[in-house]
Amino acid sequence: MSVLRTLVFGALVGVVGKKLYENGSLDRFAEDVKARYGEAKEKVEEARASRTTGSNAARKASTPRATRMSEAPSPLTPDPLARTN
């Protein structure tokens, strides 16, 4: 019974969504979402820029970074969290 109800509800939502799209009613919503995304992206970039200070950036540049292969655990190393029966 609940599966049938879900299918009917999904069909109704699809029909209503299609009508709204055809009428152009969703354009305002899409513009609002794009504007909010742009604002959020700017805030993240500002926060990222404010976290990176001159001395911090210099320290990061002088510190060698491990390669991806050396960071990965060896497949021959036993997992300390693995269960043993």
Image: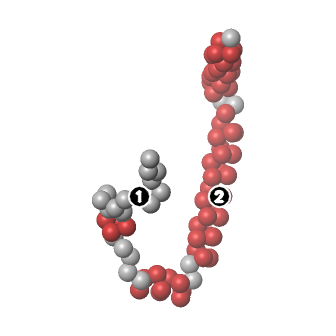
Question: Amino acid under label 1?
Answer: Asp
- Give the tally of numbered discs: 2
Give neighbour class at mark 2: few <14, some 14-19, many 20+ (Cα, 10 Å). few
User: For the residue marked with disc 2, what is the amino acid?
Assistant: Ala
Find out whether the residues at labels 2 and 1 contact each other: C-beta distance under 8 Å: no
At a point 47% along the width and 57% down the height, the residue shown is 81
Sequence-earlier tag: 2 or 1: 2
Classify residue 68 as left or right of residue 46: left
Answer yes or no: is residue 24 visible.
yes
Image height of 65 relative to 72, above or below? below
Residue in the image at 48% along x and 86% along y: 59
In the image, residue 27 above or below residue 79: above
Residue at label 2?
40
How far across and down, in percent of the image, does residue 84 sit? 44, 50
Instruction: Residue under label 1, please give it.
Output: 79
Pair 2/1: label in front: 1
Residue closest to the eye, 36 or 82 = 82
Q: Which of 43 and 59 is in front in this view?
A: 59
Residue 8, visible in the rendered structure: no
Q: Give percent across and percent down for residue 15.
A: 65, 18
- The image's colour scheme reads secondary structure
Label 2 vs label 1: CA separation?
Answer: 40 Å
Q: Which residue is drawn at 38% across and 76% down?
A: 65
* Image: 16 above or below 69: above
Q: Please give left or right for residue 9 compared with residue 80 in the image.
A: right
| Image coords of residue 4 (percent x, y) | 65, 12
Name the residue nearer the viewer: 78 or 2: 78
Q: Which of 51 and 34 is in front in this view?
A: 51
* Position of residue 77 measured from the top left corner of the image (x, y, whole percent): 34, 61
- How crowded is the residue under tag 1: few (<14 C-alpha within 10 Å), some, or many (20+)? few
Q: Quadrant of the N terminus?
A: top right
For the residue labelled by badge 2, is the local secondary structure a helix, a strand or a loop? helix
